[in-house]
Amino acid sequence: MPARRWWMLGVTCLSVVVVNLDLTILNIALPAISAALHAGTGDLQWLVDAYSLVFAGIMLPAGMIGDRLGRKRVLLAGLAVFLVASLWCALSASAGELIAARALMGLGAGIVFPLSLAVVSAAFGDEERPRAIGILTAAIALGLPLGPVLGGLLLQHFSWHSVFWINVPAACVALAAGVVLMPESRNPDPPPLDAPGGLLATAAVICLVWGFIDGPEHGWTSAPTWGLLAGSAALLAAFVLRERSAAHRIVGPALFADRRFSWGTAATVAVSVALYGILFFFPQYLQSVAGDDPISAGLRLLPMMAGLLVAGGAADQVVRAAGTRLTVAAGLALLTGGLAMLSQVRLATGYPFVAVGLALCGLGTGASIAAAMNAVMAAAGGDEAGTGASLNSALRNAGGAIAVAVLGSVLSTAYAGDLRPALAALPARDAATARASITQAAAIADRLPAGGSILRAAAGTAFLHGLSLVMLICAAVAAAAILTSLRYLPGRGAPGSAPAPQAPAAAAPDAGTRR
């Protein structure tokens, strides 16, 4: 029934909002957790990274297993794991226990995230799929900035445990409704599962993301960072060699030969780089430079969210009228313009200017990523929907994690260099602390009996210089994606360079892969 499919989409959106929320909601609770569980800096770092590492690493095997065992079944199993892990987190009594629970939570989230795309792609035909994927894509992006807002509200009234308890009712509702509303779909004739190849791919992704997480912390030239990145390269090379000789490849060459999948994925990675750049660095500006509290900073991101929701919901109509190529390129152009505006933010810049830039970024993100994701899932087809969605999700999240690490290093280097002259009068220890981050510089400025305003202004100016560089880099990535999208993505009604594998199975509501 058509109405049932849209109710199912609502349940799927709830699932991805909850799992994406946990990428950012914990950050605001870290000081409270540190005090309650006597967690050191290393413990706090692992509370964040354990979730991200397992989340990124499990996506590809989750999609392959879903294609074989049933996407609904595996998605609901992931939700159940996420629910159990949330309960464990809320009841944890030590930092080590909480880290282990966060890793288990990442496992559940990494299963739910890609299979939500696969389930929606399989449930909706060609006419409705663009709109459904646009709505789901908007829900995915909504979870990231919602984390700090919801976390701040909870911590105002409850303990740190509440940031995990909030997951429990949402996961229970999604599980119960998913059992009733989600249709089952799978590959009716799956090839044998290449377990060694899957393990190589998973290990390569984990080492890559871990290496880029480790770089800013221990230095890009440190032995652990280089060891992880070199290990990732070696594992990736081993995976490629195995794929060339394997009788049953994890990812069929026809999938990457299809321009809709390969260049659609490239566009979504470019958008993810910009989205992560905005959502991880702009809240620091709003709180430490503009002086907003966490809740107010989150609310000031609403223009971006509004633009994203509007454009994501309307993307299917634009695709019908203008085609995939022009829709993606136009969205990327709006995103580039918004990033260029945000690169011009200065100490005296008012919020209306920032709001317009954020709204343009939201509109551009919603239009481009929804249209590109629809192209990706149309190319993957019914039988490989799980694998295609997982591969795209893994690349997007790895790209986002790498972007945060690299852009963070760019910002930190520019900030520290610009701030150094203003720290000459401070004690060496305070100067080193202020140079480490804008947040710590603001804290030192608050303690100074005199001259705090001078340090705050200098730190704000230095941070905004770094932020400007970050936004310009993101704009350059988005602009490059405009050119590749115009050159390689198909236009209205144009096929990909290779036929979509088993496309009829994904297009017809009564296809044999569903039951």
Image: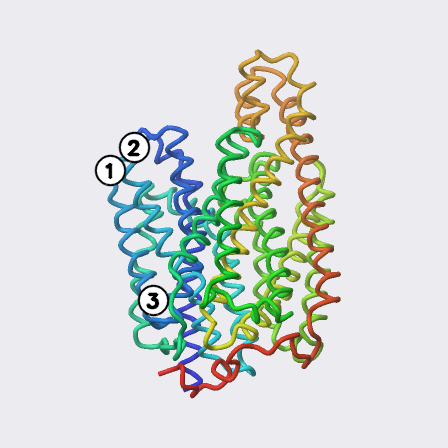
SS for tag 1?
loop
Query: Which label is found at residue 37?
Result: 2
Dot 3 amino acid type: Val
- Residues marked 3 and 1 touching at CB (< 8 Å): no
Relative height, residue 207 to residue 117 (above, below): above
- Name the side, left or right, on which 447 lies relative to 181: right
Question: In this figure, which residue is indicated by the disc labeled 1?
Answer: 93
Percent coordinates x, y for residue 195 in the rendering: 37, 59
Q: Is residue 455 left or right of residue 48?
A: right
Disc 2 or 3, which lies upstream in sequence?
2
Disc 2 element: helix
Query: Residue 74 shows which numbered tag?
Result: 3
Q: How far apart are marks 3 and 1 (CA)?
A: 30 Å
Query: CA separation, marks 2 and 3?
Result: 34 Å
Amino acid type assigned to the residue bearing label 2 in the image = Leu
Question: What's under tag 1, amino acid-wise?
Answer: Ala
Q: Residues within 10 Å of mark 1 (few under 14, many from 20)?
A: few
Q: Which of 100 and 308 is in front in this view?
A: 100
Query: Residue 120, position in %: x, y?
Result: 46, 73
